[in-house]
Amino acid sequence: MDPVRIIKQYYAPESLACRILLMHSRAVSEKALEIAGRVKHLHPDSEFIREAAMLHDIGIFMTDEPQIGCHGKKKYICHGYLGRELLEREGFSKHALVCERHVGVGITLKDIEENNLPLPKRDMIPLSVEEQIICFADKFFSKDAEFLQKEKPLDAVRAAIAKFGRHKLKRFDDWAKMFGN
């Protein structure tokens, strides 16, 4: 499987969205593989992590985020489930779950209902060690110029996650202990 080839099926190669997506995805993939190397006792599938980390944000082009070159109709929070649908159509159902489950530190059905989020009514929580590693690694990078390729400090990541509740921060902190960040 060639993640870049799949991305270029949906993104014009020279577009702003493609350039940002590839830079962000490579940074996340490198960090996720570094983490996988530290937790070999958990038996993570490094090849799957490399592929899925490259594809985790493939759904962004369907969202309305003009500052990163995306001119779709959906809210950005939808990019996860949209990426899942896209990769399921491509025949990559395991990779598709990473797309859906990486948003935030995972989104529960309760989160969706209580906040009236425009998402399918289901839990979207990283379950496998590979999903958790990719989700965790993703939190250290964003698609803005400052942190596109430069890693955010742990304190900044924790502060951003804490805004969504103590239970979200606890999940992140549990991963930080498990993955040794």
Image (spheres, grey):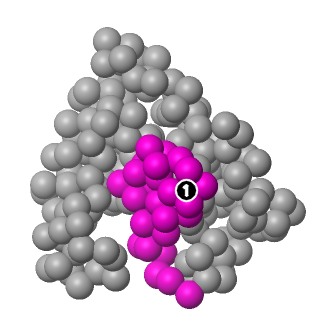
The amino acid at mark 1 is Leu
For label 1, the residue is 87
Give x and y (percent) for residue 47. Answer: 56, 26
84 magenta-colored: yes
Mark 1 closeness class: few <14, some 14–19, many ≥20 residues within 10 Å: many
Residue 71 versus residue 92 in the image, above or below:
below
Camera-side residue of 86 and 143: 86
Q: Main secondary structure of the magenta part?
A: helix
Q: Residue at x 73, y 46 (%)?
A: 4
The part of the chain drawn in magenta is: 73-101
Q: Residue at x 33, y 24 (%)?
A: 180
Give x and y (percent) for residue 92. Answer: 53, 47
Residue 86 seen anywhere in this rendered image of the structure: yes
Give the SS element for disc 1: helix
Which quarter of the figure is the N terminus placed in?
top right
Residue 161 seen anywhere in this rendered image of the structure: no
Residue 153 versus residue 68 in the image, above or below:
above
